[in-house]
């Protein structure tokens, strides 16, 4: 029995993508706590630090995750499935989600920047709820459909290729 959980490495690309989902959920929970914190405490040090941490995550790791999927995983799945209509539909839906999530994030990001700079203590509840619901619905679908499908269809060579692309993306953009 291992008492300490270890994060998956980039040698395990699907596990890494799933772990990223867990980190996104952690950021969403921080965002929801910030929403509750601001009315009483304003843009105090804790609020500014939380806003900065959320921004840092969504400005760095978040884009990498979507690039991993859009540039590498999705094309691999479509190719390995022989352009199966169900796989193509799933990918189309997930790509559409990425656009909707980016739109929701842009609004919340604008507000977080002001909080991080102590220029505002306003965070719109509807914007936070919309962002969280879009991400959670998307993550649930990826965990239930995309990742198991990827595990079934991708070859060991595909996994290595995906791993190398993910590693290169994170090395180049540091």
Image: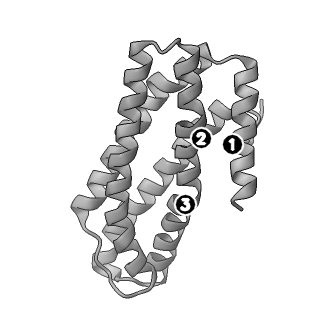
Q: Which residue is mark 2?
A: 68
Q: Badge 1: few (under 14), some or many (20 or more) residues near its Cα, within 10 Å?
A: many
Q: Position of residue 41 (x, y in %)?
A: 35, 82
* Secondary structure of the residue carrying numbered label 3: helix
Q: Position of residue 170 (x, y in %)?
A: 70, 52
Q: Note whether 36 is above or below 128 in the view shown.
A: below
Residue at (35, 39) in percent of width and height: 96
In the displayed structure image, the side of residue 98 where residue 129 appears, left or right = left
| Residue 42 seen from this side | yes
Q: How is the image coloured?
A: one colour
Please tell me which residue lies in front, 93 or 140.
93
Q: Which residue is mark 1?
A: 166
* Secondary structure of the residue carrying numbered label 1: helix
Q: Tag 2 or tag 1, which sits nearer the N-term?
A: 2
Q: Are marks 1 and 2 in contact (CB under 8 Å)?
A: yes
Q: Badge 3: few (under 14), some or many (20 or more) residues near its Cα, within 10 Å?
A: some
* Mark-to-mark CA distance, 1 and 2: 6 Å
Badge nearest the viewer, 3 or 1: 1
* Mark-to-mark CA distance, 2 and 3: 16 Å
For this orientation, the residue located farthest to the bottom is 119
Please tell me which residue lies in front, 87 or 32.
87
Quadrant placement of the N terminus:
top right
* Secondary structure of the residue carrying numbered label 2: helix
In the displayed structure image, the side of residue 102 where residue 130 appears, left or right = left
Residue at (34, 83) in percent of width and height: 42
| Residue 9 seen from this side | no
Q: Badge 2: few (under 14), some or many (20 or more) residues near its Cα, within 10 Å?
A: some
Q: Position of residue 18 (x, y in %)?
A: 57, 36
Q: How many marks?
A: 3
Residue at (55, 28) in percent of width and height: 75
């Amino acid at each position: 029995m291992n008492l300490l959980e270890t994060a998956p490495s980039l040698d395990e690309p699907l596990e890494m993508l799933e772990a990223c989902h867990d980190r996104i959920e952690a950021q969403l929970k921080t965002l929801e706590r910030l929403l509750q914190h601001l009315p009483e405490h304003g843009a105090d040090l804790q609020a500014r630090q939380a806003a900065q941490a959320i921004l840092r995550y969504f400005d760095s790791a978040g884009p990498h995750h979507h690039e991993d999927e859009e540039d590498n995983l999705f094309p691999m799945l479509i190719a390995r499935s022989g352009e199966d209509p169900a796989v193509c539909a799933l990918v189309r839906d997930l790509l559409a989600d990425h656009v909707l999530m980016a739109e929701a994030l842009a609004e919340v990001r604008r507000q977080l920047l002001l909080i991080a700079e102590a220029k505002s203590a306003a965070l719109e509840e509807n914007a936070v709820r919309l962002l969280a619901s879009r991400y959670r619905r998307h993550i649930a679908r990826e965990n239930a459909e995309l990742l198991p499908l990827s595990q079934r269809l991708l070859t060991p060579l595909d996994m290595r290729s995906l791993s190398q692309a993910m590693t290169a993306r994170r090395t180049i953009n540091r």
